[in-house]
Amino acid sequence: MMKHYFNTNRILSVTALAIGAITIFFACKKDDKTGTGEQQDNQTIAAAQSEAEVNAIYEDAFTVTLDVNTSEKGLNGQRRAPGADVSSLLRCPDMTISFTPADFVTFPKIITIDFKNGCTEASGRIRKGKVLINVNKSFVLQGAIAVITFDNYYVNGIKVEGTQTVQNLSSGNGFAYSYTVAGGKLTYPDGRVVTYSGTRNVTQVEGAATPLVINDDAYEITGRAELKDSSVLARINITKPLYRKISCPYISKGTLSISVNTLTATIDYGNGDCTGKATLTVGDKTKVITLPK
């Protein structure tokens, strides 16, 4: 079960990283455009990069919530196999997890994940402070809701605030989740502040009939968000559902747009073939980009 969850989040992470690839190409390209047009291009590119960074942080909170709620005894009603740490890539030696109430049956329950004064996980991400999760029932159950808040919480030196609500929408047709960020706020070490709100829906569209086989699974993502960085307001919208098969390390279909004022950047992920390529368009600039794994 956990393998499904982590692959689900990986879909989201690939989306964020692909958006971030905008900067790699356009930061180095110059043309004859000057004045307002070029400024709008640059604002849109910068907004795309900010969305990638911000969404990756809230996706991380989503993943941590799924990890704890589906692997800890007392939350999913099952004990992990001795020595089997399905969450080794997300956890670090100094972090602690506690529940209130501490029994195995009482809900709602508050889960406190304490990363203390700094805790580095296997991938190198450094978290500090606490993530607080209020869950109304065992999160493996359909309809379960987890409300996430943050207590002096930092990721790689960036302070994270806001309320994130995750709902289990799974059914007999497969896994499904939604998560909504309200009042999201990131404060960077240099004092820069980015505010964020948005909703993502993740739905299994293939492979539900063979729950013990993972490689035939496929997921779709839909959603939208709004981001403000300094005085620039950007709107992000998945215009065609993003699609990824678990057997392919890339999103292979769907489109996403990022709009600043009258200018919109678009990422087109293709027709479903596992090529690892996408087409990025900003204004009159178009580039085929390679997606990160």
Image (cartoon, rainbow, N blue to C red):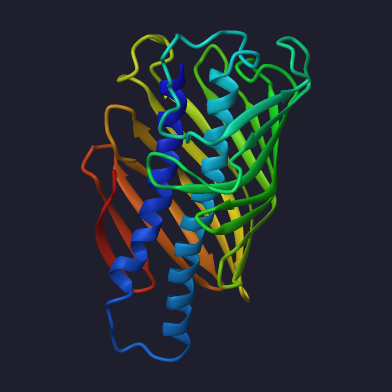
Q: Residue furthest left?
A: 275
Residue 65, picture quadrant: top right
Taking depth in this image into account, of 234 and 56 the one nearest to the observer is 56
Identified at 38% across, 17% down, the residue is: 207
Relative vertical location of residue 16 with respect to residue 214 in this rendering, above or below: below
Q: Quadrant of the C terminus?
A: top left
Locate residue 194, reporting x and y percent: 61, 65
**Closer-to-camera residue (148/183):** 148
Vertical relation: 93 (above or below) 289:
above
Near-viewer residue (155 or 70): 155
Coordinates of residue 53 in the picture (x, y in percent): 48, 57
Residue 242 in sight from this viewpoint: no
Residue that appears at 43% across and 77% down: 42
Q: Residue at x 48, y 33 (%)?
A: 93
The residue at 32%/19% (across/down) is 216
Say if residue 38 shows up in the picture. yes
